[in-house]
Amino acid sequence: PIGPKSKPFRPEVGLELKGSDAEIQKSSIRRISVEGYDTSLRMEDVDDALREHFASCGKIIHVSIPRNYEETILCRYAFVYVNEEDVEKALRLDGNDMG
């Protein structure tokens, strides 16, 4: 399921921006929290599945999948960054199965 809230993306002050980071700073990016995927999968497989699942919502800016480095397993949540105009479409997927 997708978390009920999206938050604006705010780059850290003092970070040097290059390439796509500069694009992120100039636009209105929103972060959507996602949970409920199989944490035993490889990070690349979860990333691919999230990108595929949200592809119909618009441009996926970034996918972040935290992991527990001590146990080398994925955390139960991830973040998908989308443009502000695509947030509502993404939130409509709340409760959908990624397959």
Image: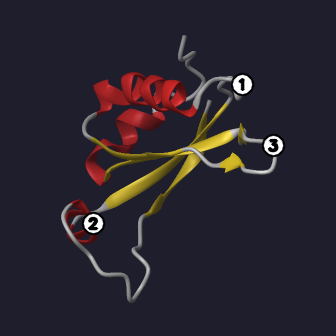
Q: Which residue is mark 3?
A: 71
Q: Position of residue 13 (x, y in %)?
A: 41, 87
Look at 47% across and 32% down and name the residue there: 47
Q: Quadrant of the N terminus?
A: top right
Helix, strand, or loop for circle 1?
loop
Horizontal side of 1 relative to 54 (left or right) equals: right
For mark 2, what is the residue? 21
Identified at 55% across, 29% down, the residue is: 94
Q: Amino acid at mark 1?
A: Ser
Q: Is residue 20 above or below residue 22?
A: above
Question: Residue 3 lies in what quarter of the image?
Answer: top right
Q: Determine whether 99 is above or below 43 in the image.
A: above
Q: In which quadrant of the rendered view does residue 48 lie?
A: top left
Q: Which mark is residue 52?
A: none
Relative to 47, is 3 above or below?
Answer: below
Ranked by sequence position, the earlier of labels 1 and 2 is 2
Along the line of sight, the residue nearer the viewer: 14 or 83: 14
Quarter of the figure with residue 96: top right
- Helix, strand or loop under label 2: helix
Q: Residues within 10 Å of mark 1 (few under 14, many from 20)?
A: few
Asked whether the beta carbons under mark 2 and mark 3 sit within 8 Å of each other, the answer is no
Mark 1 — residue?
A: 40
The amino acid beneath tag 3 is Glu
Residue lying furthest right: 71
**For the residue labelled by badge 3, is the local secondary structure a helix, a strand or a loop?**
loop
